[in-house]
Image (tube, rainbow, N blue to C red):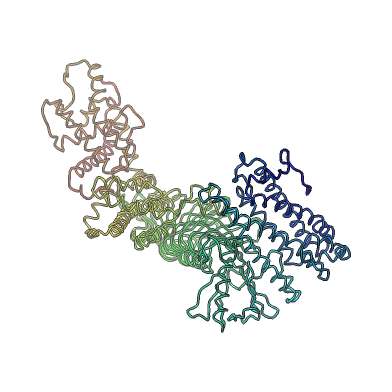
Amino acid sequence: MWSRTSPAGSARPESGTLAMCSPEEAALLRLEEVFSATLARINSLVLQPLLEAAPEASDPWGRECLPLLQQLHRSSQQLWDVTEESLHSLRERLRRPEAVGLESLLLLQSADRVLQVHLEYIESYTCCMAVQAFQKAAKRRSEYWRGQRKALRQVLSGVSSEGSVGTALLQALRQPLAHHVQQYVLLLLSLGDTIGECHPTRELVIHAAGLFGDLQSFMRQELDQATATQALWPTLSSRLRDVLCTPARRLLQDSQDVPVTVTPLRAERVLLFDDALVLLQGHNIHTFDLKLVWVEPGQDRCTFHLLTPEEEFSFCSKDPQGLVVWQWKVTQAVCQALRGKKDFPVLGAGLEPSEPPTCRCGAYTFRAEGRFCQATYEGEWYWGRPHGKGTLKWPDGRNHVGDFCQGLEHGFGIRLVPQASEDKFDCYKCHWQEGSMCGYGICEYSTSEVYKGYFQEGLRHGFGVLESAPQAPRPLRYTGHWERGQRSGYGVEEDSDRGERYIGMWQTDQRHGPGVMVTQAGVCYQGTFQADKMVGPGILLSDDDSLYEGSFTRDLTLVGKGKVTFPNGFTLEGSFGSMSGRGLHTQGVLDTAALPPDPSSTCKRQLGQGVFPVESRWQGVYGPFRDFVRAGCPGDLREALLGFHVQSSRELRKSQEYLCCERTCPEDQAGRMEDLLEELVQHREPEALQLCLRKALSNSLHPLGKLLRTLMLTFQATYAGIGANKHLQGLAQEEVKQHAQELWAAYRGLLQVALQRKGQAPEEDEDAETRDLRVHGLVLPLVLPSFYSELFTLYLLLHEREDSVYSQGIAHLSLFPDARLLEFLDVQKHLWPLKDLTLTTNQRYSLVRDKCFLSATECLQKMITTVDPREKLEVLERTYGEIEATVSRVLGREHKLPMDDLLPLLIYVVSRAQWWRRWYSRIQHLGAEIHLIRDMMDPLHTGGLYDFLLTALESCYEHIQKEDMRLHRLPSRWSSREPR
């Protein structure tokens, strides 16, 4: 490996050839030849014997010295290899100067690579030197080394016969390299002087000369630092030496050389290494990683301050010059440590900035008592504090990934907390503020429970949903308000196992205050709850509309005085109780004289209205949005206040780093918020505003869309499933209107922020009338589809009996042929759409059956294709128009129908709309449709055409129910579908 072999065609050039090149190139050739031979000689005389003399790896000294000597041997081999390459390029140049240019020389062409090989050798050499590896290894073969002095003196100059073997070895491994680099510099500088300034290789020569000149300075500094480090270790106790001594560590400054005082620690000795600052105080060692040391100049020339993750101290000195030396060296050492490589050519020099950045990355294990004790933080720092993105890991298995600010968790973060059970942990995906959970979060517990909602000071606070796993012994789901970790305020709890849903007030995790209990069997209770039990008087409503008013036991059993009102109007008033095994018993008065109640009079049978003011039910949902608007819609608070979006439960279970980076690209939130606000400003005209609101409400990432989806969640939690009870229809209906009003207020708030950001004047406050018109005319039609399924189900249940009677009437009317139905409804014959009444019976039947008010019938069927009350009214208006148009064609002139003529024609169209052609277009629940339209209709239409037409439709509905009674008394001839 170390033998020299001349490549083919690279024979030593003759003297005549040398004359054709510059003397400097010839001198470089001779220099490389000598250095290559010297390296080979040193390898055989020094390195190989050192490796042979090195102790075994099982020896403590061997474990330290052997790897260092092996690395030095590899570095020496690489140095010899690159020298041989350089020698080959020089020979080629001198052999064929006319064909091989000066730029082909390895020293010029690859000066940086040659420099790197030299740096690696110097690093390996000084590591051995700092820990006295040569001396320790040489002691194993001291007789051999004393016999090699003569051979070493032949290679080196100045090797004394009296000096130690260790010193001779150090000199043998350093002196040839130092001389070689020095000659490099001199010859390259001379070569640069001989070639013209315009020569194309001049810049390469100057660059190489500069590099090796800097290498000289670097080598001197490295040797000085290694010498100082080597001299330090004997001055320390063996315990301190074992802790501090590493081969790569270099001493930069010692307080015994330049005195300095450190307060408040009162260190006896201060050592600045290239990777750490060490304060010695008796037997205590305080070590500070330079990557996490911040230097802050003092206000006077006698002090400067250092900040570390857990401590802050000051350096003082009576000698201002000495203090300047310390501050400069600490500052440069920090810069060098952060760069991860040694400054070149000397400490503080180079192209990189000489001031360390205030923001940096690093890892640190906290030692002081507190929440972070024994935790290791790895991530971004700012002035000695975790700041930015990072990871905390505790020895007990807890870990936290997320954002930090001034040393505390702040922003989005994910924390895993292991539980006693194996492989079980709680996972908190939340927003944090000053070290505790605050804002929106999603938490998955080891019990398989999941909480989605808001926190404050680490506790559930505000609106939230807690849901247990379906396979839990008692599956529960709570949707509502929390206060300091407990259910408190308005909330809804569903007990799937018992088939119950509680809607009402809570306090300290218990049902407390007014509440409504709905059961799967259709029974409803309303009363006052205390400590999870109903107390005092209350109301019980059964599915058949039987009403009990009186007292209950804590387990909802009738007891004491009360009154039962039956659906037929009978009342039972007296005392109620239960006997073990004998059921309910009563003693009282049964009144059978009362008339049956009006089925449409259901107001008194609606629960919750007035008990839970609609404007105060879901303040925990509206509140964060209002806070967001009051804060000016800052992008960094958007997730904390409005919640963050995770696509699926599978993503919830992905790694912490994934969620921190990928949940909704939070770094882009501020920019998107600007765009959303700008869009509101640009679309304030009525038509544009409707499109803008529709787009916003349909976007799950838009603040308005997020608010709507949360309201949908609360609505479904209350009125879907077990909550689909007709006695809650009034509660739901007023809630939908309130949500529309709140969404309009939310839009207005966002618009004011947008105008303020653009420096425009805010819009004037609306009066109540204008606001109501906007809510009903603009917002309610947009949001109603989101609640329609649950809401319309309640209307269906509430009007089920009336719709059943109506359906029976429709079924009987469908038995009539068209002509006979028109006659039965007392439609004047001149309005019938028949041109020739002398047609045969079959011809007349065929004509009327297929064409009689067909356009109006098909138009009315479109009512069920939309959920918007206004669009339903527009369908009704078009139906009315089609009826008049048909009549006008029959009469051959424009004709306006009076109410007396309109009503029977409308009854005809309604009856045919149930059965005409397409079964899926039937209006099966007209009563529910009418009442929903009436309740949700824009107040602007009250007293207008729409109100008139809806009243007419209501009259049709009522007449058809009454027609059922008439039809039962008709002669049997009317039951035939074919005319006779």
The percent position of residue 416, horizontal first and vertical second, equals: 58, 59
Q: Give left or right: position of 195 versus 512.
A: right
Q: Give left or right: position of 897 versus 297.
A: left
Residue that extends furthest to the right in the rendered view of this protein: 143
Residue that extends furthest to the bottom in the rendered view of this protein: 318
User: Residue 593, can we see it?
Assistant: no
Q: Quadrant of the C terminus?
A: top left
> In the picture, residue 189 is in which quadrant?
bottom right
The percent position of residue 107, horizontal first and vertical second, equals: 63, 50
Q: Is residue 454 above or below residue 113?
A: below
Residue that extends furthest to the left in the rendered view of this protein: 893
User: Residue 516, can we see it?
Assistant: yes
Q: Give left or right: position of 627 versus 87.
A: left
Q: Give left or right: position of 379 versus 895.
A: right
Q: Is residue 219 above or below residue 942?
A: below
Foreground residue among 927 and 604: 927
Foreground residue among 224 and 320: 224
The percent position of residue 782, horizontal first and vertical second, equals: 32, 46
Foreground residue among 906 and 376: 376
The percent position of residue 662, horizontal first and vertical second, equals: 50, 50
Foreground residue among 94 and 452: 94
> In the picture, residue 397 is in which quadrant?
bottom right
